[in-house]
Amino acid sequence: MPIFKSRHPDIKFPEDCTIWEWLFAEKSSYSPLNRFPQSDWAGYTDGATKEHLSWKGVKDAATYISTALRSKYGFKADDTISLFSRNTIWYPVVLFAAVRLGGVVSGASPAYNVEEMAYALKTANSKYLATHPTSIKVAEEAARVAGIPKSHIFLLEGELKGYTTIQQLVQMGKDQGEHNQAPVSRLPLGKNNGEVCAFLSFSSGTTGLPKAVMISHQNAIAQALQIEMLKPDDQLRKVIGVLPLFHITGIVHSMILPVFINAEVIMLPAFSMDSMLATVVEYQIPELLLVPPILIRLVRDPTVAKYDLSCVKRFSSGAAPLSAEIIQQLREKFPGTGFKQGYGMTESCSCITAHPPDKYSYDYAHMGGSIVASTEVKLVKDDGTEASIGEPGEIWARGPQIVMGYLNNEKATRETFDAEGFLHTGDQGMIDGEGFITITDRIKEMIKVNGIGVAPAELEDLLLGHVKVEDSAVLGIPDDWSGERPKAYVVLKKGVARSKGIGQELIEYVEENKVRHKWIKEIEFIDEIPKSASGKILRRVLRDKAKQGIQG
Ligand code: ATP
Ligand code: MG
């Protein structure tokens, strides 16, 4: 019965403190304020306006805001605030302010419409909402539906008539005087930090409605320690905050971890190739934590050539499979760079596996990394037995970063987190003799052709290697003979006209390169592959489209 263990030494973490105390308490040996000499660069910086907050600045502002929230707005321990905004340096400040009061923070994608946002507010049982002028219309309407009064909606940036701004909250807190700040919330008596929720983070909604995942203080602390251990000796201390903050990747890698390792986070409000690359050059950012759709553009978009990216030492990818084709192109286009991945999910507070520094290499790039510290993995086969080295199975993981469960959803919690503490990821993977895990695909998305599983990612990977293909997504469609067969949605390169001939050419290309059960039944050309802000192909959207096609 193999259980694969991390090869790293175990991490040690305190169980009696909150995230706030861990990062900001005067006596905390983990606090950057105690571990590092204060510098004028560490902190959060707005990539556009250059507004900068040092950790001391973050701590002070969060303290004032929490005092205002508590004394003027009645915010109590366990209350939830939703953050519904594009990235800004004030996002983590409000997050820490709520955490300081023992509150729960729930992030929501700024791409949500009113219905989705109202669902998020109600599911999270939010009483407060912090948003941005660019999201105010949806925020206001969703808050009304969810019963949140306008007085409980705050603006992270800018000003709008009738709304309280974060700067006003800071001022209200200051006005109370230094000695009258709200007290720091302690863990409830008899509970350790693994039993108290800090974040309600929504999963990406790739397979269904997003689920509200309860992340404890301990989950985030442990994950920060697990990842810190994998930082190279040169301690790269500049981070680009381009991935959305509401997602677990943003919470861990753009907000919490940078405080702990004393980095500078350059926040970008949203992704655009030019703003991202200009920022990379301006701040000489050595490591780019990105997702596959952005990496695809990095190798394909001609604007990239305008920038001297020699400062980039390595690329990092996660959230979805990255094709071998794109990995190869990155390697050729950016010689001398390294590469790493992280694999995990909201339910594992980010990473289950990640590359250790001695393997930041393109030779290991197709794998999700090796098991992070204090973590165990089983690969479980269809028949319920455990796979050995080289055999595929469902990835199950156990460790201090595995979260508390889903909010108000006993059934889903029981189905996903077992009695022995293993999270059933729903992903298929394989482990090799060195302890590296390759993620094949999501089990639910595997196409069953005559009972044999075909991973969509494998075919997408092949199609991306065709000279006329810009992007692609593959899913299973019903087939009388085989049960299911793959269908490919293809975006053609600019200047390539759609035709039956090209469809046939691509079908034959797959037939030349893959065994029969992987052959494609159908090709449809589309303008763009639907993808989530967190970087995943939304096959659900394509599936709905395919169904409508059949009905219509
Ligand atoms: P939902 O659970 O709502 O359907 P989701 O699973 O996409 O959405 P997340 O928690 O954001 O929501 O994503 C976790 C999933 O992302 C994993 O289960 C896995 O399928 C995929 N993933 C993450 N990292 C990688 C990686 N490095 N390689 C391949 N897939 C990855
Ligand atoms: Mg999931």
Image (spheres, grey):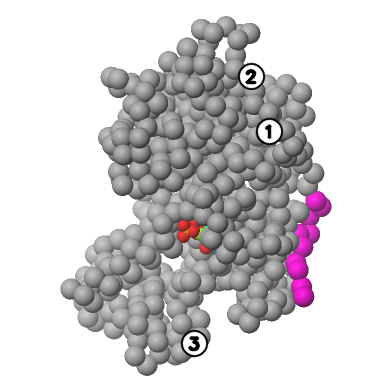
Disc 1 residue crowd, few under 14, some 14–19, many 20+, Cα 10 Å: few
- Tell me: residue 22, above or below residue 394: above
Q: For the residue with label 2, is its CB less than 8 Å from the closest atom of ligand 1?
A: no
Disc 3 residue crowd, few under 14, some 14–19, many 20+, Cα 10 Å: few
Mark toward the start of the polypeptide (2 vs 1): 2
Q: Which residue is mark 3?
A: 451
Which of the two marks, 2 or 1, is nearer to us in this view?
1
Q: Secondary structure at mark 3?
A: loop
Q: Residue at x 73, y 46 (%)?
A: 229
Residue 449 sits inside the magenta stretch: no
Q: Which mark is residue 188?
A: 1
Real-space Cα distance between discs 2 and 1?
14 Å
Which of the two marks, 3 or 1, is nearer to us in this view?
1
Q: Which residue is mark 2?
A: 183
Real-space Cα distance between discs 3 and 1?
51 Å
Tell me if label 2 and label 1 are in contact, CB under 8 Å: no
Image position, residue 486 (x, y; %): 39, 80
Mark toward the start of the polypeptide (3 vs 2): 2
Q: Which residues are magenta?
A: 1-10
Q: Secondary structure at mark 2?
A: loop
- Tell me: residue 192, above or below residue 181: below
For badge 3, the amino acid type reads Gly
Q: Residue at x 68, y 33 (%)?
A: 188
In this picture, residue 354 sits left or right of residue 153: right
Q: Residue at x 76, y 23 (%)?
A: 27
Quarter of the figure with the C terminus: bottom left
Disc 2 residue crowd, few under 14, some 14–19, many 20+, Cα 10 Å: few
User: Could you tell me if residue 124 is visible in this image?
Assistant: yes
In this picture, residue 343 sits left or right of residue 246: right
